[in-house]
Amino acid sequence: MILSAHQPAHLPWLGYLDKIARSDLFVFLDHVQFEKNSFTNRNRIRTPQGTAWLTVPLSTRGHMNGAIRDLRIDESRPWRERQIRTIAMAYRRAPAFDAVFPVIEGWISDPTDRFADYCFHQLQGWLRQAEIGTEVVRSSDLAPTARKSDLVLELCRRTGADRYLSGALGRNYLDEASFAAAGIAVEYQDFRAPIHPQLWGEFVPNLSAVDHWMNTGDLRTGFAAA
């Protein structure tokens, strides 16, 4: 069984979906610490002025060292309305806008104020749209105790996985010898975003999957595992 894992992601890139599609089981890492300035609560889209960040504001005061599952969205800002308007302005000329925009608008409008729950609900929508049937579990339900490389190894052992699919950055911290000793093979994702028709000039890769979906109408063409 192939296992992969990743922190929650707002409007994830295609590589996030590709990793899940290549796995038999995906662990939604909501018990780990939030990483500031990561792609956890933000991603980029293409606009007439260039790329733009779409960020979910978080109430991090007193919670920076806590788990992602405990973070709440900062609802003092009208961020949902702003993101919906920004996406509409950026992609209203895209071929699949009429079909895709209402779906994304619905996801962003989800009133859930717990960030992990918000991302989990959104992820379920992405998987339905991309027709990915991989089983997904939340790490907070598994209650692992280890950290870093040992955390991944613990997740593999608990779920019975014999292969772990890591992102490219896993090369920097995974103790492959420990996995080998446990009889678990480690593989690294080598995802390269496909070039697709794109509005507003020269192609920009590795944006939110929103960009591919709006311009092609089919998420499944965005990754080889589909």
Image: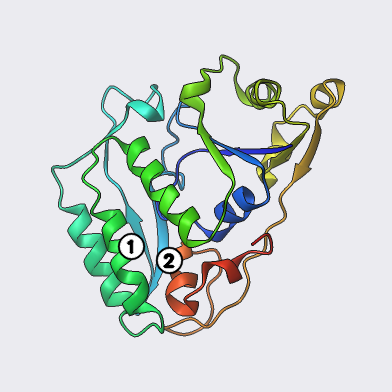
Name the secondary structure under disc 1: helix
Residue 39 at what x, y percent from top left?
46, 48
Contact between labelled residues 2 and 1, with CB atoms less than 8 Å apart: yes
Instruction: Say few, some or many: other residues with alpha carbon within 10 Å of mark 2 (under 14 / 14 to 19 / 20 or more).
Output: many
- Amino acid beneath label 1: Ile
Q: Which of disc 2 and disc 1 is earlier in sequence?
A: 1
Residue 29 sits above or below residue 225 on the image: above
Residue 223 sits above or below residue 68 on the image: below
Residue 45 seen in the current view: yes
Using the image, tell me which numbered label, if any, was put on residue 85. Answer: none
Residue 91 seen in the current view: no
Q: Is 205 situated left or right of 211 in this image?
A: right
Dot 1 corresponds to which residue?
Answer: 104
Q: Residue at x 27, y 73 (%)?
A: 88
Q: Is 167 situated left or right of 126 in this image?
A: right
| Farthest top residue in view | 145
Dot 2 corresponds to which residue?
Answer: 210
Residue 169 at what x, y percent from top left?
66, 43
Q: CA distance from mark 1 to mark 2?
A: 8 Å
In the rendered image, which quarter contains the N terminus? top right
Along the line of sight, the residue nearer the viewer: 97 or 66:
97
Instruction: Say few, some or many: other residues with alpha carbon within 10 Å of mark 1 (under 14 / 14 to 19 / 20 or more).
Output: some
Q: Is 213 situated left or right of 144 in this image?
A: left
- Amino acid beneath label 2: Val
